[in-house]
Image (tube, helix red, strand yellow):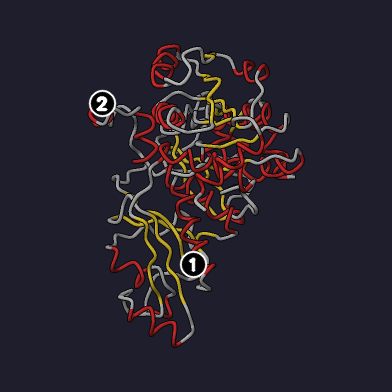
Amino acid sequence: MSLLNRYTNFVNERGKKTKVALVGAGQMGQGIVTQINKMPDTDLVLIVDKNEEKLDSAKSKYEKNKDISLSTNLDSLDDQELDIVIEATGTPSAGAEVAFKVLNRKINLILLNVETEATIGLALNNEAKKNDCIVTVGDGDEPVAAVELYNFAKEISLDVIAIGKGKNNPFDVFKTPKDLEKEAKVKKMNPYMLTSFVDGSKTMIEMAALANYLDFNIDIDGMHGPSSTYEELNSIFVPKSSGGILENTNVVDFAFGIAPGVFAIVFSEDDYVNYEMEYLKMGKGPFWTLYRPYHLTSLEIPRTIMKLMVEKETQLSAKKWNVDVIAHSKKDLKAGTNLGSIGGDNIYGKAMKVENSKNLAPLGISENNVLNSDVKKGDPISIDNLDITDNQLYKYWVSQNN
């Protein structure tokens, strides 16, 4: 039975529709509204965003209910009877505030905000379990698309050697929104979002979240990020002893040249499996590439809603904490500088093994905090470099590290 049919049966048996709220009506949020508008048995009852113009735009896309509630204040979440809240701001501090409000009311949380997951995902997983609800990164983001490949491989008894995503933007850690303003306008994107792609922060965040869910790691800090065709992946992301680049297996990474897809490099020791795979035109073993050549971001959120309600399982929420995304400076920074946002003028993120990131400041924690000492261009920022605002994000992060 299809997921859609199972969801319809679930709603019919429960006797009421799924009630959803959305926080964040930007580019991703607008897509979510459009898709929920088409979903059977699902009502979007509230949209929250600080920008009233974005709220009006989102409301215009929701034709099922023109009386939908709009709010510029997160406290409006407290007034609603909800099954699910979708957090789509892309801001870790906002994600933490929403999580605290939602999970402590036993409401399920979908994060289209992998930035929050990569900062405090383990703390949120623990909070959700404590309150008998679910937190999950949404379908459509590369990490969940990659998890589907991982699950497929394990279900047919193949070992996963490496897993990751394609990167289709140039990679320059020192790029700023001003540098990319014209390109962002052409692409109808927020320049800060585009900058987070180009400076590598988004890729580091996504792969850290994937690693911490699968209990994988990174082979080297920053990952390898080679250029590759689809046909070359299974000769690159394999152990050095087999001619590849990896010192370790069970790692996440990324590659240029295969975007916007996700990949998994799989392996079997069985001679007959190798014969079958080659016969089935999967190339020459014993390493093969599983590949999905697309991910549809916010447009896939209906699947997350249905799976969450029917299967009552997370698609991706940290089980271990193996990889941090650490803030590094884009230029020489003076004491007193507000570091600003992810994808901004001052900081970029680099994925690091936790054993190498001790006393260093995660990108999400650094956002909008102030330096108390100078930092040189390209250097990591330490926790001691920051005057940290004691907000909900920081509280979750402290609990995660204790």
Say whether residue 269 is visible.
yes
SS for dot 1: helix
Q: In the rendered structure, which disc, 1 or 2, sits on the residue that comes first in sequence?
A: 1
Q: Where is residue 272 drawn, in percent x and y?
A: 44, 87
The residue nearer to you, when weighing 168 against 153, is 153
Mark 1 to mark 2: distance in Å?
40 Å
Circle 2 crowding by C-alpha within 10 Å: few under 14, some 14–19, many from 20: few
Return the residue nearer the eye: 295 or 237: 295
* Label 1 packing within 10 angstroms: few (<14), some (14-19), many (20+): some
Q: Where is residue 236 drawn, in percent x and y?
A: 35, 69
Residue named by callout 1? 153
Residue at image mark 2: 185
Instruction: Give 181 or 62, whichever is nearer the viewer.
Output: 62
Q: Is 133 rendered above or below residue 244? A: above
Q: Residue at x 66, y 40 (%)?
A: 124
Left or right: 165 with respect to 113? left
Residue 160's place in the image compared with 52, above or below, is below
Residue 203, percent across and down? 42, 47
- Where residue 61 sits, quadrant-wise, is top left
Residue 208: x %, y % from top left: 52, 50
At 53% from the left and 66% from the top, the residue drawn is: 250
- Location of the C terminus by quadrant is top right
Residue drawn 53% across the image and 44% down it: 326
Instruction: Give the camera-side residue of 74 and 361.
Output: 74
Which image quadrant for residue 387? top right
Q: Secondary structure at mark 2?
A: helix
